[in-house]
């Protein structure tokens, strides 16, 4: 059996071909979408038993000390109570048990994500993983959007860790699809962005593709092919049209934004090689998560101390707030959750006149709330698609805390990112040296009225067609899988 799979930055989905069309398979209850997240609890650490050889050594030292204490007291004419051998043994055993418990607790706390992944621990995915993390962020490891890091300059141990996470997610989705269909899926077409997130250019892209291919094979697939995500979205749209057209396709996803200019229609839909119909493509490493971060920095982080003055007359450094919310940057998150940042926050707290705000920042650090804060920004962004103003509830930070945010705040926060998106579309059109007949938009970010307004302003004389914001790419990948594997 064959399938198309969108391993997305924010969500994953998988489809199979049935009755001459792509069918997406439910992954979470009735939803075709599963969040690209994994949670694993820390593995339990057994408290070791008392080492009797060590106990004998400590008892010998304790008895010698008791004798010296009694001798000193006698020489000084003072009275003193000495402990019996059984009392000394009880005391030393108690001390050793406490030391062993503290050692086990530290070992539990100091576990790495890799330790937990390879131990006999519970691993959950999607919404279940989100709920587990939100319930107790300190007692496990939560990994969101692993695709974000694949094109970055990361160490081999980080590659190994992300590879294991991605393999687990892909294998989970594969198993869900096979259970649903009662058949084995051995061939897959996966989507890829024009450029993966990172700063290594084509080297980063090749690294990311290699990791995804190896993870897919490790998860049980025998055949793995890749196509550009905006091309996949276009192939989904092509199934519904009856005339030949040229389309400018924009796929504005969670981690990247990609464009293609492609010829579509009856003359091309049965081709198993589409390179000659793709007139241009362009991509940027900016996506919905970046918009969430920008909105959080502008509208939320001032309530956590951003722009707050210290007694020195200086503001708290901007970087600490950025590191707190930049969940798609592994180095930023490492910086924020370091001992250095803990000491810095305590210093800011002592020097700030708005201690309630800085205390909220300290709470993010202590409870590891970066993801939840980013999720709040995402929910605010979504809500502002339908409303001009909202009051964002943040009771998990402070009872009754509600932060007013307007659509204008969002527009101002993401102005640079929207400009990048428009420039990307213009770049693709210029590369193609043709005027598209329609603009086909898909991806969660493209739902924003701010983005739609910017597209209309810059391409007002070209008709805009909206695809399924979340399913178009997967449907196109499944369409392509049917074409190349059959």
Image (spheres, helix red, strand yellow):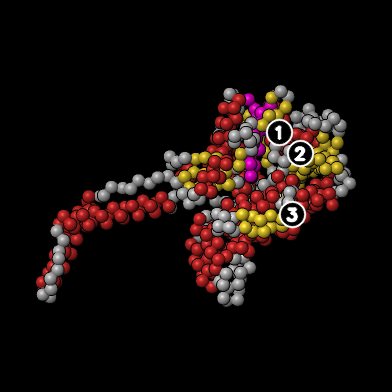
Q: CA distance from mark 3 to mark 2?
A: 24 Å
Q: Is disc 1 in contact with disc 3, using a CB cutoff of under 8 Å?
A: no
Residue 462: % across, % down: 87, 44
Q: Nearer the viewer, residue 185 or 44?
A: 44
Q: Nearer the viewer, residue 243 or 457?
A: 457
Disc 2 from disc 1: Cα separation: 11 Å
Quick one: 472 or 436, which is closer to the camera? Answer: 472
Which class describes the residues within 10 Å of circle 2: few (<14), some (14-19), or many (20+)?
many
Q: Residue at x 82, y 34 (%)?
A: 264
Position of the N terminus, as image quadrant, is top right
The front one of 467 and 400 is 400
Tally of marks: 3
Say which residue label 3 marks: 388
| Res. 231 in view | no
Return the disc, 1 or 3, that comes first in the chain's sequence. Answer: 3
Residue 286 located left or right of residue 397: right
Residue that label 2 marks: 467
Q: Earlier in the sequence, mark 2 or mark 1?
A: 2
Q: In the image, which is nearer the foreground, mark 3 or mark 2?
A: 3
Residue 192 in the image: state x and y as whole percent: 68, 41
Q: For the residue labelled by badge 3, is the local secondary structure a helix, a strand or a loop?
A: loop
Task: Determine the residue positioned at 12% across, 75% down.
Answer: 76
Give the dominant element type of the magenta stretch: helix, strand or loop.
strand
Q: Is residue 344 above or below residue 276?
A: below
Q: Percent position (x, y) of residue 344?
A: 52, 67
Label 1: which residue? 475
Circle 2/circle 1 CB separation < 8 Å: no
Q: Nearer the viewer, mark 1 or mark 3?
A: 3
**Residue 228 sits in quarter:** top right
**What range of the chain is rendered magenta?**
1-17
């Amino acid at each position: 059996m064959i399938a198309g799979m969108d391993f997305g930055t924010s969500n994953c989905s998988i489809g199979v071909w049935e009755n001459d069309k792509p069918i997406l398979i439910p992954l979470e209850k009735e939803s075709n979408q599963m969040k690209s997240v994994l949670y694993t609890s820390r593995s339990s650490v057994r408290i070791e038993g008392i080492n009797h050889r060590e106990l004998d050594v400590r008892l010998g030292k304790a008895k010698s000390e008791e004798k010296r204490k009694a001798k000193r007291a006698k020489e000084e004419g003072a009275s003193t109570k000495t402990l019996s051998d059984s009392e000394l043994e009880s005391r030393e055993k108690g001390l050793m048990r406490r030391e062993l418990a503290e050692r086990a607790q530290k070992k539990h706390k100091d576990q790495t994500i890799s330790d937990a992944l390879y131990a006999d621990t519970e691993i959950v995915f999607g919404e279940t993983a989100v709920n587990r993390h939100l319930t107790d962020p300190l007692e496990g490891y939560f990994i969101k959007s692993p695709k974000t890091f694949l094109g970055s300059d990361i160490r081999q141990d980080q590659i190994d860790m992300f590879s294991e996470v991605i393999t687990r997610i892909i294998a989970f989705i594969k198993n869900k699809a096979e259970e649903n269909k009662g058949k084995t899926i051995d061939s897959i077409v996966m989507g890829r962005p024009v450029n993966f997130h990172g700063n290594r250019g084509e080297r980063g892209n090749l690294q990311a593709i290699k990791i995804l291919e190896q993870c897919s094979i490790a998860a049980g697939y025998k055949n793995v092919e890749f196509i550009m995500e905006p091309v996949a979205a276009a192939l989904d749209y092509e199934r519904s049209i009856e005339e030949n057209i040229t389309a400018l396709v924009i796929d504005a996803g969670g981690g990247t934004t990609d464009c293609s200019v492609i010829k579509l229609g009856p003359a091309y839909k049965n081709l198993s090689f589409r390179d000659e119909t793709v007139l241009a493509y362009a991509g940027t490493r900016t996506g919905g998560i970046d918009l969430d971060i920008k909105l959080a920095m502008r509208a939320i982080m001032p309530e956590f101390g951003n722009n707050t003055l210290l007694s020195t007359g200086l503001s708290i450094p901007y970087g600490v707030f950025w590191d707190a919310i930049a969940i798609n940057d592994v180095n930023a998150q490492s910086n924020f959750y370091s001992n250095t940042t803990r000491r810095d926050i305590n210093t800011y707290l002592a020097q700030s006149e708005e201690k309630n705000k800085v205390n909220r920042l300290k709470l993010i650090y202590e409870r590891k709330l970066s993801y939840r804060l980013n999720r709040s920004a995402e929910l605010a962004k979504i809500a502002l698609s339908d409303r001009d103003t909202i009051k964002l509830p943040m009771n998990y930070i402070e009872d009754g805390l509600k932060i007013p945010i307007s659509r204008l705040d969002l527009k101002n926060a993401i102005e640079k990112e929207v400009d990048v998106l428009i420039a990307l579309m213009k770049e693709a059109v210029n590369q193609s040296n043709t005027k598209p007949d329609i603009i086909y938009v898909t991806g969660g970010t493209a739902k924003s009225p701010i983005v739609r307004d910017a597209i209309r302003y810059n391409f007002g004389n070209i008709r805009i067609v909206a695809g399924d914001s979340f399913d178009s790419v997967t449907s196109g990948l499944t369409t392509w899988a049917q074409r190349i594997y059959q």
